[in-house]
Image (spheres, grey):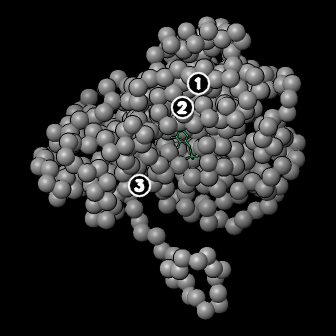
Amino acid sequence: MTSERQPATERRTYEPFTPPRRVLLGPGPSPVEERILQAMAAPLLGHLDPVFLRCMDEIQELLRFVFETTNRVTIPISATGSAGMEAALVNPIEPGDEVVVCIHGVFGERMLDIVGRCGGRPTAVRAEWGTPIDPEQIRAALASCSKPKAVAIVHAETSTGVLQDLKGLSEMAHDHGALLIVDAVTSLGGHPVGVDRNGIDVCYSGTQKCLGAPPGLAPVTFSERALEVIRNRQTKVQSWYLDISMVEKYWGGERTYHHTAPISMNYALREALQIVYEEGLEARWARHQRNHRALVAGVEAMGLAMNVAPPDRLWSLNAVRVPDGVDDGRVRARLLSDDQIEIGGGLGPLKGKIWRIGLMGSGSARQNVRLVLDALQRALQAEGFDCASGVEAAERVYESGAAS
Ligand SMILES: *Cc1c(COP(=O)(O)O)cnc(C)c1O
């Protein structure tokens, strides 16, 4: 490889790019079913073609189904989950607005950064990484504000494996005239999110976690209360691309050109949502829960420990402590090279301390639980850490579940 940056010349030949088939059990992207890859290969349509408009309508209908909402404005933003986060924050927040931002991992920190960039005045509520936010601290933070505009919180903290209970948060926010903004990137399609049930005003997700499509779109939903707040803004939304009142005109009745929708990605999302619909939300959540339980049983039978207390554990993302004396990176490298399995490492204060095993979307499967437990045992033994097999303990969870 040359170190100077050169344009491609006629003399160079490029080998075909043939990525290996990995088993994606990290923090995302998750495995994508063949059916979805096929859908992406369908012929391109114009972004205002009546047939594509029908595809868009079905996506909105199916998104309302997975978000469990009747919100009119429920659409995919044409960019990844972080753009969903940015859309959720830049639309309601104006310079000077007070925002309570809950931080218990990487994605809470990212929200805080965006609120600052909007000119908002954040009040941070923090919890140690690996634990959820204490709602009483949110209550206190709201009380310390004069006119809070929103509470922003991550439902499924992918950096730590923690599930945040949302119960009572909307009443708390609404009592102060604030909106509840929820990051459901790693929960939507894997855990109950229940936008309307939980009184969430703005919720966003990504396609590549529990929805099981490739990365590239960010489903978002805005309640009427949120839209009212946005209509009453004194200033323009600072982002042209993410201004929901403009994006909505393309997705809504007017179909005004705003940007060229990523056609093939929308085919993929439509197909992924159809798969969720066919499976059913309850069955899908139960599958994510069952495979998580089996994985935990296996991990513990191996003599390893989970990093999050049982009631706060995500089903979609499992944080496993790296045993003392074991090099986190070397084990992950072995899984990738020997078994084609990708798992994640820790971030920030958890760097080198945890592995993050994602069981998301179609990746949440009995076969993958078996595969990763077996491969992890072999990798640990190769690194000189003696441990038992976790596979049998995991299998017992499935068998007891089948009996009940
Ligand atoms: C993955 C993730 C995001 C960001 O999504 P990208 O698609 O990587 O931009 C935001 N929040 C959470 C909780 C995530 O897990």
Q: Amino acid at mark 2?
A: Gly
For mark 3, what is the residue?
Answer: 24
Is residue 387 shown left or right of residue 358? Answer: left
Q: Which is more toward the observer, 347 or 287? A: 347
Q: Residue at x 25, y 51 (%)?
A: 327
Of the residues shown, which amino acid type is indicated by label 1?
A: Val
Instruction: Say which of marks 1 and 3 sits in front.
Output: 1
Q: Position of residue 93 (x, y in %)?
A: 74, 27
Image disc number at residue 108: 2
What is the C-alpha distance between the residues marked 1 and 2?
7 Å
Tell me if I can see residue 273 in this picture: no
Q: Is residue 344 visible?
A: yes
The picture places residue 71, in percent across and down from the top left corner, at: 71, 28
- Judging depth in this view, the residue of 154 and 252 nearest the camera is 154
The alpha-carbon separation of the residues under discs 3 and 2 comes to 24 Å
The secondary element bearing badge 1 is classed as: strand
Q: Is residue 284 left or right of residue 262?
A: left
Q: Left or right: 242 with respect to 15?
A: right
First in sequence: mark 1 vs mark 2: 1
Residue at numbered disc 1: 101
Secondary structure state at the residue bearing disc 3: strand
